[in-house]
Image (cartoon, rainbow, N blue to C red):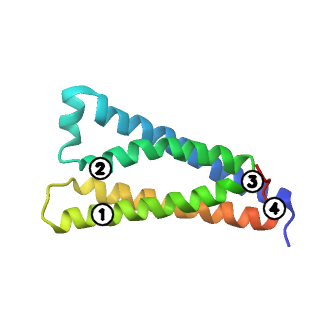
């Protein structure tokens, strides 16, 4: 069995990735939503509900990252909920595409990346919590 300190490095890497990923998500989503005509034109056929979800979820990513860094128990459940929410939005996006609506192909890649990154972050958070016993608050 690994000690709590042996899980500190993976936990800190996962939390750092979560925070940076969240900040980048907020910046890119904010630019597409609020950046004016040129930014909106560059977004192309972005799907509004996906764009808004991604922008708002960036704030949740930052929060989860800080919770993971502090070893908070709620951060594990929150990360699991983020994976579930991303998967649901990705499925709804798939339905949108299936119905023949306009979309950007880069959204498929972005949502795939988002889901895989959060599955990895969540797996690390779960593993570290099981080994080190997260704090109550």
Which numbered mark, 3 or 2, is in the foreground of this view? 2
Q: Secondary structure at mark 2?
A: helix
Mark with earlier residue (1, 3): 3
41 displayed left or right of 25: left
Tell whether label 3 touches label 1 (CB within 8 Å).
no
Where is residue 127 drawn, in percent x and y? 71, 67
Question: Which of the numbered marks, if any, corresponds to residue 49?
Answer: 2
Question: Which of the numbered marks, if any, corresponds to residue 46?
Answer: none
Q: Secondary structure at mark 1?
A: helix
Q: CA distance from mark 3 to mark 4?
A: 15 Å
Tell whether label 2 touches label 1 (CB within 8 Å).
yes
Query: With respect to residue 14, does 96 lie above or below?
Result: below
Where is residue 97 drawn, in percent x and y? 20, 63
Q: CA distance from mark 1 to mark 2?
A: 9 Å
Which residue lies under the disc numbered 3? 9
Which residue lies under the disc numbered 1? 92
Where is residue 60 drawn, in percent x and y? 53, 45
Residue ID at (63%, 53%): 14
Q: CA distance from mark 3 to mark 2?
A: 36 Å
Tell whether label 2 touches label 4 (CB within 8 Å).
no
Mark with earlier residue (3, 2): 3
Query: With respect to residue 43, does 99 lie above or below?
Result: below
**Mark 4 burial class by Cα count in 10 Å: few <14, some 14-19, many 20+:** some
Which residue lies under the disc numbered 4? 133
Q: CA distance from mark 1 to mark 3?
A: 36 Å
């Amino acid at each position: 069995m690994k000690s709590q300190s042996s899980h500190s490095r993976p936990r800190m890497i996962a939390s750092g990735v979560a925070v940076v990923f969240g900040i980048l998500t907020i910046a890119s989503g904010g630019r597409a939503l609020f950046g004016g005509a040129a930014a909106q034109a560059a977004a192309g056929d972005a799907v509004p509900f996906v764009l808004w979800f991604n922008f708002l979820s960036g704030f949740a990513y930052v929060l989860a990252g800080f919770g993971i860094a502090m070893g908070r128990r709620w951060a594990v459940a929150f990360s699991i909920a983020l994976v579930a929410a991303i998967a649901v939005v990705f499925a709804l996006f798939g339905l949108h595409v299936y119905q023949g609506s306009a979309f950007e192909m880069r959204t498929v890649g972005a949502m795939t990346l988002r889901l895989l990154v959060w599955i990895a972050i969540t797996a690390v958070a779960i593993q570290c919590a099981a080994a080190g016993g997260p704090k109550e608050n």
